[in-house]
Amino acid sequence: MKIIIKNGSEQPLYQQIKDQIKGGILRQELKEGEKLPSIRSLANDLHVSVLTTKRVYDELEKEGFIVTTVGKGSFVASDNLEMLSESKRHMIEKKLSEAWQMAKTLGINKQELYLMMDIIFEEDDE
Amino acid sequence: MTTVLDVKNLKKELDTFSLAKVDFLLKEGCITGFIGINGSGKTTTIKTILGLYPRDEGSIKFFGKEIEKNEYIIKNRIGVVLDEGYFYEDMTLKEMKSVIAPAYTNWDESIFLKYINRFNLKLNQKIATLSKGMRMKFALTLALSHHADLLIMDEPTSGLDPLIRNELMEILLDFMEEDGKSVFFSTHITSDLDKVADMLILIDKGRIIFNESKDELLDRHALVKGDNSLINEHTRRLFLSLRQTAVGFEGITDKLDVVREQMNDCLIERPSIENIMLAYVKEG
């Protein structure tokens, strides 16, 4: 598992760590069922608080990326439906923001963009 | 996370100093750094918690139990390292150990010898001849040898060189590897905490200023630098502390979003624990 923390980053620490673990799981560098380090040893390795790594694991668990069993530790979830949908959702958001950036450079405003979307929805319905 | 120490409304009047309504909690599984400048009340707080000073008011619960009624059980679960080791100077390390060991039901000779070897301490050496670093190591050895769940240390690193300080931090992290352990230690050398602390409690003039997760504290504060032209009556208020020189300003803020919005072209950096501590500790 590779995690690099940027000290000058605007993102809070837990977010940086969470995103990178998530990334590792989505890119399948972390395999289904793989054991993750304990919150204490991850905290020690990254020089962050155990409260931060605990929050990361808690949130990753809530989002279905990992499973934690008391006494055994945390593992990459093997039921990855939710994960995939989350990652696809992320892809859509990315494409939408690309579209919006492009629209802005062409001087197309929000209203016009909404209209375009509406037309696309209508075409799809027909 | 369960609470290992719950201090409520602690008051203590000394001749020249008083603790005013000290409240805080320690969580299990955390290393909590107790920070503050010299004379802020760190040692008084620790000694009062441990019952070395009688308190005037307030309640102290270790592991959910009142200390008065459960002193023996509680002291068995606590390891203590104080600034001035409470040792008999004429004794050898071995003699001192035989005075202390019987006080604990869980004394573990093998752990004791493990640390004596690790620290290169000599059992037949007289306490009086120990250097400051050796003294701390011996006190730590005693504190770790009875399977304590909570380690309380008062300024364990003060006056020690960076190498020994680093060694101590590594030992604390080793200690924390086991479930259910907690550490509470005071220091004015905040760089010791950068690597190891989970929680930070700041005390100033006998009052607790904050008790917060280290990372969240560092996330919500920022060190801002820039040109003096950015500082006006309004932006000045965004800073907890602000230092202006002929070449620019440098300040600590806890209103990062507003600074980002209203001050263009300034440099925003992650602060150190020391930056934050000094911003809260007002002079006078």
Image (spheres, coloured by chain):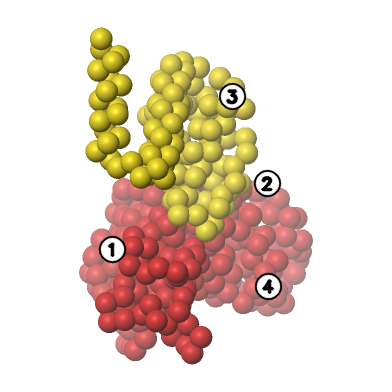
Q: Amino acid at mark 1?
A: Asp
Q: CA distance from mark 1 to mark 3?
A: 47 Å
Q: Which chain is yellow?
A: A
Residue B188 on image: x %, y %? 50, 73
What amino acid is at disc 4?
Asp
* Gap between marks 4 and 2 measured at Cα: 28 Å
Dot 4 or dot 2, earlier in sequence: 2
Q: Position of residue B175 (x, y in %)?
A: 58, 49
Residue A28 - label: 3
Badges 1 and 4: C-beta atoms under 8 Å apart? no
**Residue B161 image label:** 4
Cα gap from disc 1 to disc 2, whole angstroms: 38 Å
Mark 3 element type: loop
Q: Is residue B195 above or below residue B259?
A: above
Quarter of the picture containing the C terminus of chain B is bottom left
Instruction: State left or right for residue B212 relative to residue A65.
Output: left
Residue at 36% x, 80% y is B231
